[in-house]
Every structure is written in C-alpha cells, then in structure tokens.
Image (cartoon, coloured by chain):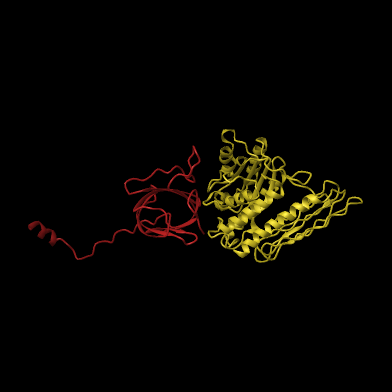
Amino acid sequence: MMLLAVAGCGESNTPPAPAPAPTPFELAGKWLYLGPSDVPHNLTVSDTAMDYSDVDGHWSSSWTLKAHDNGAHHFQVVFGSGSGTYIPVGDSMSGAYEVDGTFLTVQLAKGLAAYPPLQGPGTCTGTADGMPVPECRLYVKQN
Amino acid sequence: MISRHHGRLGILLALELAIIGGCSVDAGPDGGSAGSVSSAGTPASAGTVGTSGSSSGGPTTGTAGTSPSAGAPSGTGGAPTAGTGTGMGGMVMGSAGTNPKGGTGSGGTSTTGGTSGGAGAPTAGSSAGGTGSGTCQKGQVKASEVVIMGESFYAIAPQYNQKRIEEDARKAGSLGANESYRNVAVSGQNMNYIATTEWTAATQGGASVKFVIMDGGGIDCLQGGTSCATCSNTFKTLLDKMGAAGVKDVLYTRYPEPGAPPGSNASLKTCLDNTMPAMQTTCAASTSPKCHWVDLRPVFVAGDTTDGLHPTQSGGEHVGDLIWSEMVKNCLAQ
C-alpha cells in the first residue's frame, strides 16, 4: 500500500503518449494474380487487411493483418470472412514475400508459428519438376 | 446459346469452304484473284468463296481480297480460291500470298470493325505448311509433340485457351479423347525464361517437339518500360534452337489488347505495340521452323477478359478457335 501510494503521488495528469503509428505495409495496393495454379483473382492489401477476390466476383475472403515486417518480408493474417469457394483457406496464415519490380511472390503457410521459406522471387514452380508450389502465388501490381 | 451454336456452324462452314477452296481448283499458270473474304456481320456466317484466277495467259496479278471484319468473333472468313488451287480460308491477319506457279495473288486487308471479332484476309496462292496437292495428311504429329510455351496467358487455370484448341482438335479427329498437348508455360515468366528454362522443359529427356504454340514478351513489358528491346533477339535464339531440334512449325500468338475492356491498359499496350513489330519480323524471317504469326487482337473482345490479362471462358473460346483455324489452314498437327 505504501509503495502504491508513493507511486501514485508521482503520477502526472498528462495523458500517455500515443503508440507510434504502425509502419505502412509495403505491399499496400492492388495486385493481380498471375499464377501458377489458382484462378484469376485480385489481392488488395492495406495496412490492416488483405482481401482476396475472384475477378468474376464468385468468391472473396478477407483477412485481418495481424503483423507485418517490411524488413524481413513477413506478415501474419487472421481470417475474417469469406464467401463462395474462396482462397486461401485457414484460420490464420503466415506469409513470406518478395517484391521484384512490379511482381510480388507470396508464400503462405497455415498458422502463426513460423514463416515459410520462399523459393525465390518470381518463382512458384518447383525447380526440379516444374510443378506449382502449394500456397505460392505470383502477382503483378495493378495500376 | 443460339448465337454460339450458329457460331460453331459458321466455323465449320468456313472451314469446309476453305478446304473446298484449297483443293478443288486446278493449278494454273497464273496468280488467281483471291476471293473476297468477307466476314460476317452476324455470328457464324462465313465469307464468300472467292473466285479462282484465270488459268491462261502469262503471269497476272491477283486482286486483293478484302476482309472487313464485323460480327461475332467466332465468325471466320470465307475461303478464297486462287489460281493454284491452294488458297486458304479466311484468317485474321492479312498476308499476301505468293503463287508458286507464276502469278501473284495479293493478300487481302484485314480491318476490324463491327461489334466484335475479326474475319480474315485471304492468302492467295501458296499453301503454308500444307501439302502441295492441297491435301493435309492427318496423324503426322503426335499430341505429345505439340508444346505450348509462354506465361500465364496459357498457364493460368483453368487454361481456357488450351482447352478450346483441344476441343476443336478432338472434334476434327486430330486429337484423341484422352490425349492432350504438352503445356510447359509458366506464369510470370519473361522471354528469356521461356527461351531457356521452358524450352529445356519441353525437350527434357529427349522429348520430340514438332509444333509449338507460344507467346512471350508480355511479362517483360509488365516489368516496366515502354518496350522490350531484347525480346526479338531472344525469340530468334529460341527459334534457332527449335529448328536445330527438329521443330517444324511455331505459332506465335500476338497478345490481345491489354486491359478490361481490351485496350484500356495504356501503359502495357504501349509496350506491346512497341515490342511486337520486331517479334513479328523475327517470326516472319524464320523458315526452320516456319513461324506463323497470329494476332489475337481482332478476336479478343469485351467480356473476353475480366482482369485485363487473362482470358475468360469466352476469351479462351475465341483464342482457341482462331488458333485452331490457323492450324487447320496450315495443316499443323492435324
């Protein structure tokens, strides 16, 4: 009690400094899917969300951006809502990405435990067999 | 459904007319006048059959066929018959045909207009890839020897372009029910990747390749800039490699106008417009393999793409039908 009282005496009435604004996510913007294995769709990224939407409007999914790191090229998202036969599927996702000019390569993995390895910028097919790498998607920046 | 049904009938009619035109006229010493290839203002109507050229006298110059296009994208032009009897059916690209018997049949012009799709210009005179007799022998190329290369335009699911070509081929009896062409296209890859990694994949294990359907250069343009300066040289290098490996024919498809609606992506359009002429020149100069240039712009109409780059089902149908018509015309993988 004594300690609390002492601590309380030292408080000022000035409000605490606001938390620093989150760093803008470098992927913010609209991206068009190029391949390799899903149907054409758009990926819209903001500082707080990632939204996938079918170009024909048949499905969509919205994800809340939980964390991002522009330096490490990582992000984490939590599922918000979906309609139709949407992608990706899961409760939460960890992602690794690379931006090369106007192209974005994203490798997703389920859960928030670890970030998946990214094969390489601009590459979502296996080097040995040429088969699409699961949960790897290639996009191009839209105007 | 009705218009599509009519469209299919129109294609069949046009193809039949082309075959008739290509085989029935006796070779004469002169260049015949290419028939007018008018394409149809309504879906599916074929153009008229051109008249054959005169068969006497010295070399004459054939008159050009015209092919104003209008109507539905699936409408194909009619079949001109030229003096040598190997005039081909309508196609989108106007190209002057030469008459190996002496005369020169001048090609028609191809303009686009109407509400959709293009019709064709005639090629008078020579047969390109077909046999000299005007017949086309089937079964000369295996399905596995037909390779599709490029990027997402051919790779992206559900591969509408390839599906349509294969549907057409099966209907014509040129592809078995369980057969498929080999698609080594990889999304997002530039011309250099296509010319190296994809070509390596196409020939892996000593696989035989006789006929290639491809595009390339679009990703180079998407990477920025107003043109791809290296694309045509890379393309030439690839063609040389293909020729050395025994590829007989390459069908390069010039990209549709980018954007939705087509043409609305101004920056990409500028780059493609600046890059494609040199690619076309390279294609035209290649004799081994023979390179066939197919311009997809006239058949790719509003509704054929939603994202501005990739075909919808209707886009795949229009692209596939045009490619197949070129394959029929030139006796490729029949």
Q: Position of residue A25 (x, y in %)?
A: 40, 55
Q: Which quarter of the image is occupied by the C terminus of chain B? A: top right
Question: Can you see residue B89?
Answer: no
Residue furthest to the top: B206
Please report the residue visible at 72 percent of the width from the left and 62 percent of the height from the top.
B39
Outermost right residue? B57
* Left-right relation of B63 to A95: right
Residue farthest to the left, as pictured:
A2
Q: Which of A112 and B229 is in front in this view?
A: A112
Q: Quadrant of residue A5?
A: bottom left
Relative to residue A6, is residue A116 depicted above or below? Answer: above
Placement of A94 over or under A18, stated as above or below: above
The colour applied to the residues of chain B in this rendering is: yellow
The x, y position of residue A84, in whole percent, is: 42, 59
Q: Which shade is chain A?
A: red
Answer left or right for A86 relative to B161.
left
Residue B287, given in percent of the width and then of the height, sits at 72, 41
Q: Nearest the camera: A119 or B137?
A: B137
